[in-house]
Image: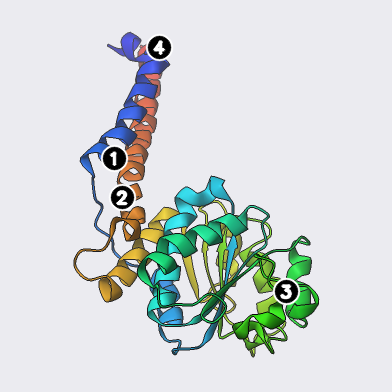
């Protein structure tokens, strides 16, 4: 038995992992969500804003990170629309603008047709410069953003008239996959202007350790990977979506099932491998 396990063809491992991911998707396995303090803080910071308050929502990621960050971005837009906030979208990543436009189609245009582009929400798009963009718009936004993503002059967009900088935003939100992202927003916007600005964030799992040192002073709320997205999604749905949310507002919940089963399989294989190793070493000594 030990020799069979020791010489097990790795293709069986690949098959088990395939089944661990595929079966929960086919069977629609759902994982009960227990919300944590950090996820609730993100929800609360947005939820305590008043109708008409300004929120800057920066999609600092690309399609490769959509699996982790897409569901939380969707839920953030959903909550902002329910609160009737003035939403200023932008991105520090060149692949970000299409993701913003997709959120318009999926959430705003589908569920909130009364919201008017330019009056209730706007896509400022992408400007090159990494953290340099933050350093400029923190004091002089019109000098860099002369038009929106669609090419319309800022002066012709009602919600952008008189907008001098982002210090007037009631909240900053960064959905971040790395550099530049949440850390740069904290360093170059929130920290120098801590008396005026506050930020919450959603990030990938690998980026989270870089952001933990900023909690709770500079960063009161943080959604970490698909688990954080699922917790936040539940909070938003419980308050705004009723007992039967549309599938697009349940994406994080749907993606948690395959991740949980795959992680359990990995843990099981690691334990089995270690047990096999120690058994073989004991046999060699006898």
Disc 2/disc 3 C-alpha distance (Å):
36 Å
Which one is in front, 155 or 58? 155
Which one is in front, 53 or 46? 53
* Residue 188: numbered disc: 3
**Residue 228 in view here:** no
* Residue 284: numbered disc: 4
Which secondary structure, mark 2?
helix
Query: Which mark lies nearer to you, 4 or 2?
Result: 2
Q: Are marks 1 and 2 in contact (CB under 8 Å)?
A: yes
Left or right: 260, with 149 as reference point: left
Where residue 183 sits in the image (x, y, percent)?
A: 65, 66
Read off the residue under disc 2.
254
Left or right: 24, with 189 as reference point: left
At horizontal 61% and vertical 57% (from top left) the residue drawn is 96
Q: Badge 2 local density, few (<14 within 10 Å), some, or many (20+)?
A: some
Query: Which mark lies nearer to you, 2 or 3?
Result: 2
Which one is in front, 165 or 179? 165
**Disc with the residue nearer the chain's start (3 vs 1):** 1
**Disc with the residue nearer the chain's start (1 vs 4):** 1
Give above or below for 115 relative to 176. below
Quadrant position of residue 109: bottom left
């Amino acid at each position: 038995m030990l020799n069979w396990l020791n010489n097990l063809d790795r293709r069986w491992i690949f098959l088990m992992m395939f089944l661990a991911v595929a079966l929960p998707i086919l069977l629609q396995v759902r994982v009960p969500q227990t919300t944590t303090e950090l996820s609730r803080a993100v929800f609360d910071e947005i939820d305590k804003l008043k109708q008409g308050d300004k929120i800057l929502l920066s999609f600092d990621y690309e399609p490769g990170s959509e699996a982790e960050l897409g569901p939380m971005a969707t839920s953030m837009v959903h909550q902002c629309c329910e609160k009737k906030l003035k939403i200023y979208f932008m991105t520090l990543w060149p692949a970000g603008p299409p993701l913003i436009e997709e959120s318009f189609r999926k959430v705003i245009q589908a569920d909130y047709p009364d919201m008017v582009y330019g009056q209730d929400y706007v896509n400022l798009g992408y400007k090159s410069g990494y953290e340099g963009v933050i350093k400029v718009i923190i004091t002089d936004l019109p000098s860099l953003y002369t038009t929106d993503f669609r090419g319309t002059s800022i002066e012709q967009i009602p919600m952008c008239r008189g907008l001098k900088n982002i210090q007037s935003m009631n909240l900053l939100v960064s959905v971040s996959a790395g550099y530049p992202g949440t850390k740069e927003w904290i360093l170059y916007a929130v920290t120098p202007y801590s008396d005026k600005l506050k930020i919450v964030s959603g990030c990938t799992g690998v980026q989270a350790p870089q952001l933990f040192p900023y909690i709770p002073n500079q960063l009161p709320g943080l959604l970490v990977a698909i688990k954080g997205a699922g917790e936040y999604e539940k909070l938003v749905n419980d308050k705004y979506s009723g007992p039967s949310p549309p599938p697009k507002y349940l994406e994080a919940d749907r993606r948690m099932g395959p991740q949980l089963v795959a992680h359990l399989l990995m843990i099981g294989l690691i334990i089995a491998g270690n047990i096999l190793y120690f058994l073989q070493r004991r046999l060699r000594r006898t």
